[in-house]
Amino acid sequence: MVSRSSPSERGRLARARRVGLAKPGAIVHPSAVVMASDRVARRTSRGFAYLLLMMALAVVGIAASFAVTLGAAAERRDAERHLLFVGGEFERALVAYAATARRGPRELSELLRDPRVPGVRRHLRQIYADPLTGSTTWGLVRDREGFIIAVHSLARGTPIRRTGFAPGQESFADAEDYAGWRFGLPIAKAVVVRPGSAAASGPVVSGWPRQP
């Protein structure tokens, strides 16, 4: 006589085959099917948890990168504000120096102690560091005779600030780089010349042609 399994038993066998517990014709205890199903469920749950973790890490990474970018931009804006202040100090010193002989100094150190007059006469308290580079080395704009008529930052990149400049600094709004922010005598701001252009035919100092 051939025994026939009940529908519930056939269902258990089918589930057991799917989870790899039984071969066709085998008899499987119901508890084994339940345990195997639980193992499959746990593996599936771990897989989804891992996927969710990876997605969360990706979101955190993107947010952190965005925060770093915002922080760097804010830091550069602050450095630009300091550059405008420090540059203003250099400009006032160069104007004061040129008021006597209508020319700038040969070196920036002459602004600390004017060699043309007896005693100690200071036009600048110190050679300030460039807030963007942290260095006391500045780009120098000289006239045809080699006298300094302006300074500018040697930092790379395009300025963020485009508005809110002081009188006399209106040209800074259109500067393509920080070298366009020239602090010094008015003649240094009259003409903006880029190396390699048709007008850049004179001697070059600190990457800039000497101004006529």
Image (tube, rainbow, N blue to C red):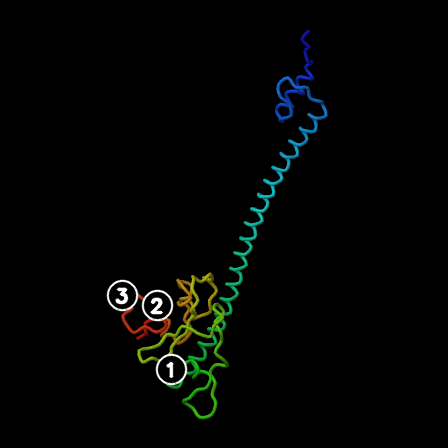
Write the residue at 30% across / 74% down. Answer: 203
Q: Is residue 40 above or below residue 57?
A: above
Precedes in sequence: disc 1 or disc 3: 1
Residue 136 vs residue 121, the one in the foreground: 136
- What is the distance, in whole Å, between disc 3 and disc 2 at their CAs? 12 Å
Q: Tell me the number on the disc at residue 198.
A: 3
Image quadrant of residue 106?
bottom left
Q: Name the residue that disc number 1 marks.
A: 106
Q: Amino acid at mark 2?
A: Val
Q: Secondary structure at mark 3?
A: loop
Secondary structure under the numbered disc 1 in the rendered image: loop
Q: How many labels sit on residues?
A: 3
Q: Are marks 3 and 2 in contact (CB under 8 Å)?
A: no
The residue closer to the viewer here, 202 or 81, is 202
Amino acid type at image mark 3: Ala
Q: Earlier in the sequence, mark 2 or mark 1?
A: 1
Question: How far apart are the alpha carbons under marks 2 and 1?
Answer: 22 Å
The answer to which of 103 and 209 lies nearer the viewer is 209
Q: Residues within 10 Å of mark 2 (few under 14, many from 20)?
A: some
- Residue 194 relative to residue 122: left or right: left
The quarter of the image holding the C terminus is bottom left
Viewer-nearest of discs 2 and 1: 1
Position in image of residue 193 (x %, y %): 33, 67
Compute the Cα span from label 1 to label 3: 27 Å
Q: Looking at the picture, which amino acid does disc 1 mark? A: Arg
Does residue 54 sit above or below 1 in this rendering?
below
Circle 1 Cα neighbour tier, 10 Å, few/some/many (<14 / 14–19 / ≥20): some
Residue 144 percent location from the top left of the image: 31, 78
Q: Earlier in the sequence, mark 3 or mark 2?
A: 2
**What SS does tag 2 mark?**
loop
Label placed on residue 192: 2
Mark 3 residue crowding within 10 angstroms, few (<14) / some (14–19) / many (20+): few
